[in-house]
Amino acid sequence: VVLLLCLTKRSCSSALPQLARSLWAQFQTVLCASGEGDLYSAVRRAWHFDTICRLVDRDLPDILLPTEMWNIGVYRNIYTRARSSEQNDRDSSAPMLMVQRFRFAVDHDGFEPPQSPAWLWRYRISWQGHPHSSEDFDWLVDYLGDVCSNDHATAGDILLLLNSMSVSCSPAKQRPYIEKLIACMGSSIPPRLRHAALRAAHSFREVLASIDIVDDADMVLTNFSPAVLTAVCPQPGATPTDTGPDCFFDYDRDLCYLELIFALARNSQWRPRLYCQIDRSIRMIAVCCESNWAHAFYLVGIFLRMTSEEVSVTSLGSITEQQWWVLMRKAWYHAYRTIDDTRVEFLPVLAEGTKKYIHIASKPELEQLIDDVDDLIRRVERQGLLEHRERVAAMKELSGVANDTLAKFSR
């Protein structure tokens, strides 16, 4: 009786926080309970879950941590959806089993609530329970398709889960998933959903980068890039603001954006469709030249890959030699910290581009460049892979040019 009274009426009782903590412990117990048992056990677990989830509907601030409240809300939505789809099923435990299938824990550095823009970029979700296959997440893709146009909050939550999975959805669901990502990044979509879709696309970037123009994939290639641009810049013609989720530059959002475009630019089929990203990327140069962030590595990668196209990108001609050089040396500084198997193939391109602007380097800049390149050579050589020989050779050639240029300062 006390439980239901506290849940159905607003109360300022000092016992309410203690009750809420007890409910959270019970919630976790129910969630982790075995799916086996008779019909009575299944109904009892479902009743407990329904009762606990009613906590989400109450105005009870600061009783549970924001991430715990968000957990309950996400589980409740999954449970409600599964119960609706299983309403004609005699197995009363099916909805609860669906919730248990997507058990997760949220890890986040900081105190921002899940509704804050900063939380969107810094949270981490770890999946719990049995290992997940790609088909496990097809259900969430279907759920996203049903709610993305009319329930932006739930759609954003689904994308946060999909972003955190260690496997993508099954090949059969990839096209519908990409189409929903495009829809969720539209200019009329609220910032939280647009940015959740951007981060989900970022986690899906290697799959996207592997898409070639075959069959109907051209539609994806054509529509996806403009959608990514509206995700970070919903009104391209408007004067950008310095604050808010759609401000001109945001460290986390734009790092995610640049890493995604960098990955797509690796595929020559994508490059003509990425031209719409160039003007915005160029406007970011000033910020990146004044800071010491990894963004410079991805900017250089995008620019160099785009200049390798037969069709020239006129806007790139506005980048000065000094800007090119600053971005190049910052790219090498961060290359050691950002390089992996998907980025190491870019090193010969970066080495060749750097030689073009090395003549304007100062002595301290050359010394730093040589240290950064040599450190990276040693790291790549330690891997002992045959396919890295060409990359190491390109970096050693750059190191030699840099040393020769440095020697001129002593003459």
Image (spheres, helix red, strand yellow):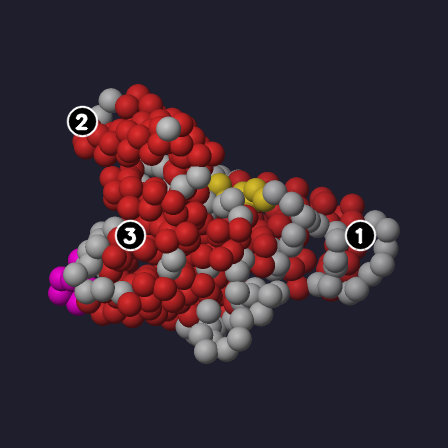
Q: Which secondary structure type mostly characterizes the magenta part of the structure?
A: loop
**How many C-alpha atoms fall within 10 Å of the one at disc 1: few (<14), some, or many (≥20)?**
some
Does residue 299 lie above or below 376 as drawn? Answer: below
**How many C-alpha atoms fall within 10 Å of the one at disc 2: few (<14), some, or many (≥20)?**
few
Q: Position of residue 237 (x, y in %)?
A: 46, 78
Relative to 291, 363 lies left or right = left
Q: Which residue is mark 1?
A: 16
Q: Amino acid at mark 3?
A: Leu
Does residue 96 lie above or below 274 as drawn? Answer: above
Q: Which residue is mark 2?
A: 386
Closest to the observer: 146 or 376? 376
- Could you say which disc has been placed on residue 303 in the image? none
Give the SS element for disc 2: helix
State which quarter of the image contains the N terminus: bottom right
Q: Of marks 1 and 3, which one's residue comes earlier in the chain?
A: 1
Q: Of marks 3 and 2, which one's residue comes earlier in the chain?
A: 3
Q: Position of residue 82 (x, y in %)?
A: 44, 59
